[in-house]
Amino acid sequence: MKVVRVFLLKDIEKVGIAGEIIKTAEGYARNYLIPKKLGIEVTAANESSFSHRVKTIEHRKEVVESKTSMLAEKIKGLELVLKRKIHDGDQLYGSISPREIVDELAAQGVAVSGSQVIMDKAIKTKGNHTIVIKLSSKLQPTLKVKIVPEATA
């Protein structure tokens, strides 16, 4: 099996990230990566231009990591207070969804997607709850959510 080096143009799950030079089987590169414009074969002639681009990408990754860690610190310091209708002492009508958490975080100036909100189980009672926000595989800050009764008129 012949191995070729390929400069990835886009992130490919379980293969590599954009801007990375990977070693892969020649067939995979010629039949999939190159025709779909996911990568370019690295040859002796074009290697120097790719090595320069790899350095630029590494710098960009550092910037993204620092922004992500700043976001993680901001999330750690937050406590969301949600007012909901409550019955039977401490039971909620319905439950709190990840979408509601995303909307509340957006109101606080923190942009995350619903898929990043990790809840062990649905929140159906008043009180304090802890939710994990998955920013990356390494950065997973916890967020405190406090459910309080809605004031009845």
Image (cartoon, rainbow, N blue to C red):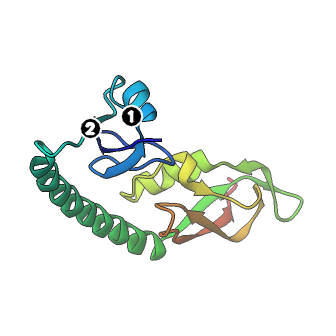
Element under label 2? strand
Name the one closer to the observer, 117 or 57. 57
Quadrant hosting residue 128? bottom right
Q: Indicate whether 51 appears above or below 76.
A: above
Q: Give the number of the disc on residue 41.
A: 2
Q: CA distance from mark 1 to mark 2?
A: 8 Å
Q: Dividing the picture into quarters, in which one does residue 87 lie?
A: bottom right
Query: Residue 111: percent from the left, percent from the top?
Result: 40, 52
Residue 61 in picture, x, y percent from top left: 27, 61
Residue positioned 49% across, 69% down in the render? 138
Q: Residue at x 82, y 64 (%)?
A: 90
Say which of 73 and 149 sits in front: 73
Residue at (48% x, 41% y) in the render: 1
| Residue type of the residue flagged with mark 1 | Ala
Q: What residue sits right under mark 1 in the picture?
A: 29
For badge 2, the amino acid type reads Glu
Mark 1 lies on a secondary structure that is: helix
Q: Is residue 2 above or below residue 70?
A: above
